[in-house]
Image (spheres, grey):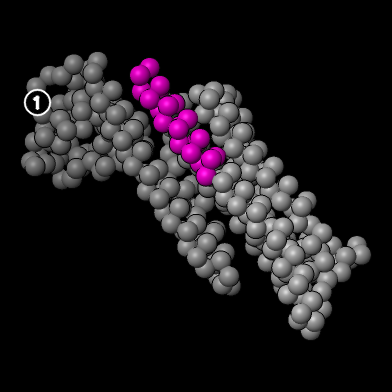
Amino acid sequence: MNMEKTGAYLASLRKGRDMTQQQVADTLGVSNKTVSKWESGAGLPDIGALPALAALYGVTADDILAGETRPRACGDTPSEVGLYLERRSGLRFRIGYSVAVMLLAAWAAFQYTTWSWLFLLASPICLWLGWSTCRSKDTLRRRILLCAPLCALWLFAAIQLLGVWSLLVSAYALHGGVVRQFSWAELTVRQEAVWLLLPLLLAAALVVGGAVLKEPLVRDRGFRFALYGGCGLLFAVEIVRILVCWKPATVYAATVSTAESVMISRYADLSAVAWPLETVRWIALAAVVAAWLVWGMQAYRHAKKN
């Protein structure tokens, strides 16, 4: 790459636009000295300023780096620069999103350690650092749709870090409930909350995303119905499971741990009620995921045709 040729080309472009070095510097947000260094061949424009410089002069970034001297029509240039910026923006978002997902997975793996909250804090920060200006509404729609599951998981993780499960068990005991198996009760509440809260939080994230976009986040009506209907089905199955298992679960939680034979008998009663509903839960989850995949593929094919 010949920096002197590139510098001479930049100087000719500026003079062809009848602009001074100071005007170019003010437009790009750099110093006059920087523009002078570019045109003297002492340095090249950095990757951040190159697209804006190309757009200003009506050429491509490749032309500037090559020191192109042939005249070029200005009509096709902004689209080339725009495509370059779009690709760079998409790459930046993908990197930030991938790191955010990995940090969230690390939090899930080490959530019972005292420092796990650092992973949870870093996850949305990485996504924010990877976010950049969306040049189209479709790009914004895709990004919000990708972020909806992450937002649901972040909210659930925040609720768990606040120790809400132990507070719920304590509140139950405070209002007349008998809890002698406190650790078991807290663990059970935490496990049930995964199935109960995550569908609600996912549906809420999709609704909020649509409100930000000011139109439905998912355009395809069938896929939209599958998303919200699936969340509603999972929530309904979990409510039924809680109602059916409530009485045997409270009886077992009130059992004294020293009465081993009684504990085994009451736990068997609870299992006899819970296991069939556990099977129903997994069947419902499999059906919902299958419906999401089918409707999602149909929506993708339909969008691709249009």
In the picture provided, is 275 more to the left or to the right than 15?
A: right
218 left or right, relative to 207: left
- Position above or below: 264 against 276: below
Magenta stretch contains residue 57: no
> Which corner quadrant of the image does residue 49 belong to?
top left
Considering the whole magenta stretch, tell me its main secondary structure. helix
Residue 236 location, x and y as percent?
69, 42
Residue 267 or residue 158, whichever sits in front: 267
Q: Secondary structure at mark 1?
A: loop
Which residue: 45% across, 53% down?
A: 101
Q: Quadrant of the C terminus?
A: top left
Above or below, 24 against 119 in this view is above
Left or right: 111, with 191 as reference point: left
User: Is residue 132 or residue 111 the one in the foreground?
Assistant: 111
Q: Name the residue at the right extreme.
A: 176
Q: Where does residue 53 sit, x and y in percent of width and height?
A: 27, 32
Stretch in magenta: 286-306
Q: Nearer the viewer, residue 104 or 33?
A: 104
Which quarter of the figure is the N terminus placed in? top left
Q: Give coordinates of residue 277: x percent, y percent.
A: 66, 52
Q: Is residue 253 left or right of residue 202?
A: right
Residue depicted at 28% across the width and 33% down the height: 84
Q: Which residue is mark 1?
A: 69
The residue at the point 18 percent across, 45 percent down is 43
Residue 221, image x and y in percent?
54, 23
Say if residue 227 shows up in the picture.
Answer: yes
